[in-house]
Amino acid sequence: MATKDELVYAGEKGRFTLYTGLCKGCGLCIEKCPTGVLDWNDVLGVYGTPSVLPVAKGKVCTGCGICQQLCPDCAIKVERTRAG
């Protein structure tokens, strides 16, 4: 269950959680997302900058976890859904 400081998107291939209290809005995750699914959100992060949203342009998060690895503030957690 998400709290007010979390944005959660549960898709077919995984669960993306953004901790808005940690996100400074640097945009590294948006820049490096291989599917281009991340985009800016209307929800503001810790410094009053926009946070991110994992459902941009009608695409869906694949759960690859690159955004989680690149986030300098540990504001993203990606959990892959097991197939089968």
Image: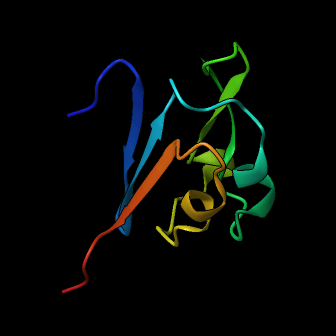
Residue depicted at 52% across the width and 60% down the height: 61
**Which color scheme does this rendered protein use?**
rainbow
Residue depicted at 70% across the width and 63% down the height: 33
Rendered image quadrant of residue 7: top left
**Rendered view: 28 above or below 5:** below
Rendered image quadrant of residue 46: top right
Rendered image quadrant of residue 26: top right
**Rendered view: 42 above or below 51:** above
The x, y position of residue 20, in whole percent, is: 52, 27
The x, y position of residue 80, in whole percent, is: 35, 70
Q: Quadrant of the C terminus?
A: bottom left
Q: Is residue 84 left or right of residue 59?
A: left
Q: Quadrant of the N terminus?
A: top left
Q: Is residue 45 left or right of residue 11?
A: right
Residue depicted at 70% across the width and 53% down the height: 29
The x, y position of residue 64, in whole percent, is: 52, 73
**Rendered view: 14 above or below 28:** below
